[in-house]
Amino acid sequence: MPDEPEAAAPAGEAGLSKNEQKRRAKQEAQAKAKAEKAAAKAAADAAKPKPAAAAQEEEEEEQDPTKYFENRLTFVNGVKEKGANPYPHKFQTSMQLPDYVAKYESIGSGEMSADGGVGLAGRIATKRAGGKGLVFFDVVGDGAKVQVFASADKFSDYAGLEKDEKAARFSALMSTLKRGDIVGVRGTPGKTKRGELSLFPTDMLLLTPCLHMLPKVPPGSSGLADKETRYRQRYLDLIMNPTTRSTFITRTRAINFLRRFLDMHGFLEVETPMMNAIPGGATARPFITKHNDLNLDMYMRIAPELYLKMLVVGGLDRVYEIGRLFRNEGMDLTHNPEFTTCEFYWAYADYEDLIKFTEELLSQMVLNICGGYKVKLHLEAKLGEPAKELEIDFTPPFRR
């Protein structure tokens, strides 16, 4: 009989020797066994009971927000019933968080500062259990973050206690501190072995319990994204999105620069009436209010123009006002019925003078706030499209 043909080797193994094929098969078997072992270990770890504090914390984070609020309210009322104040009157801080970071950032990994009793206060952004008698907090405030490395062995109130009693009292204190709470922390500055700047507390005090559950940030997200929530609850936007704080700061710096610039050029800042008997100075629908004593309908101003011109007539040759206007018209995410404007009037100047003045104002403002004449505007990306970036150049002279 003719010999039967040998089975064809797999496409990927064509031309390989039998020894090479055996070696590859052995590698695949070892990799498969390793993957199965890792999966079994992960399943076993998941099945292990978590520490009571960590399990309770996770359970509370999964609660319905209404139930969470009720539990926190019960806690606050319980503190009051015991004769204690859930909102302490005073906690003496040594410095703000940005100052702390600047002062102690140079400490080496695993080292402790000689300074003791440093007091900080801020909001708990994250809380992580690190084992029995050990809890990590990220405390934020004034745009900075500091890790709090809380260990039961370091707390001065627990010195001299038996180990079990110390652990019980530490666990009871930690269970009262939740994400979103404002806390006061006093201890010794230092860095962990991994180089994380921390405060190793000897004392922690709950200053303001956060009664409402903070929103959870989805993995991969930088913060709170829902625009409806962000714009209607700006305080929540500030808590969850650090970049919102920088927007507030930039706006304040822009207004401060504008005021200084006008002052340096001889302009006088004034305040004009916010309520007018006759709305004027612009074409817009006004808000109507009531003056009870005069029994007279009044209109919230739609522009300060007429009063500023009266001051120029009176002899104030350079005059300006930074203030609120009220226009009872359409609104959306970028248009508010009440908004801040700046109007200035300059006698004996024409539009050529105003062009040069405005060019200097804008270019110097951008240079002062951003450190250069070019700024980048991050445009909102459409669904399925990458985010776009637009660069705007304020380098003078501007194109005429």
Image: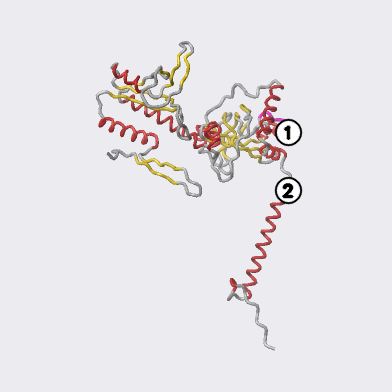
User: Which quadrant holds residue 19?
Assistant: bottom right
Vertical arrangement, residue 68 with respect to residue 377, above or below? above
| Helix, strand or loop under label 2 | helix
Packing grade of label 1 (10 A; few <14, some 14-19, many >=20) is: some
Vertical arrangement, residue 253 with respect to residue 17, above or below? above
Q: Is residue 152 left or right of residue 394?
A: right
Q: Residue at x 55, y 43 (%)?
A: 221
Q: Residue at x 45, y 14 (%)?
A: 296
Colouring scheme applied when the structure was drawn: secondary structure
Packing grade of label 2 (10 A; few <14, some 14-19, many >=20) is: few
Q: What residue type is disc 1 on?
A: Ala
Q: Residue at x 69, y 24 (%)?
A: 77
User: Which quadrant holds residue 117?
Assistant: top right
Q: What residue type is disc 2 on?
A: Ala
- Which callout, 2 or 1, points to the residue nearer the camera? 2
Position of the N terminus, as image quadrant, is bottom right
Number of the label disc, if any, that sits on residue 47: 2
Q: Residue furthest top?
A: 293
Q: Residue at x 29, y 40 (%)?
A: 399
Tag 2–tag 1 contact (CB < 8 Å): no
* Magenta residues, start to end: 156-161
Instruction: From the image, tell me which residue sits under label 1.
Output: 168
Q: Position of residue 17 (x, y in %)?
A: 61, 76
Q: Position of residue 206 (x, y in %)?
A: 63, 28
Q: Position of residue 97 (x, y in %)?
A: 53, 32
Q: Is residue 13 left or right of residue 369?
A: right
Position of the C terminus, as image quadrant, is top left
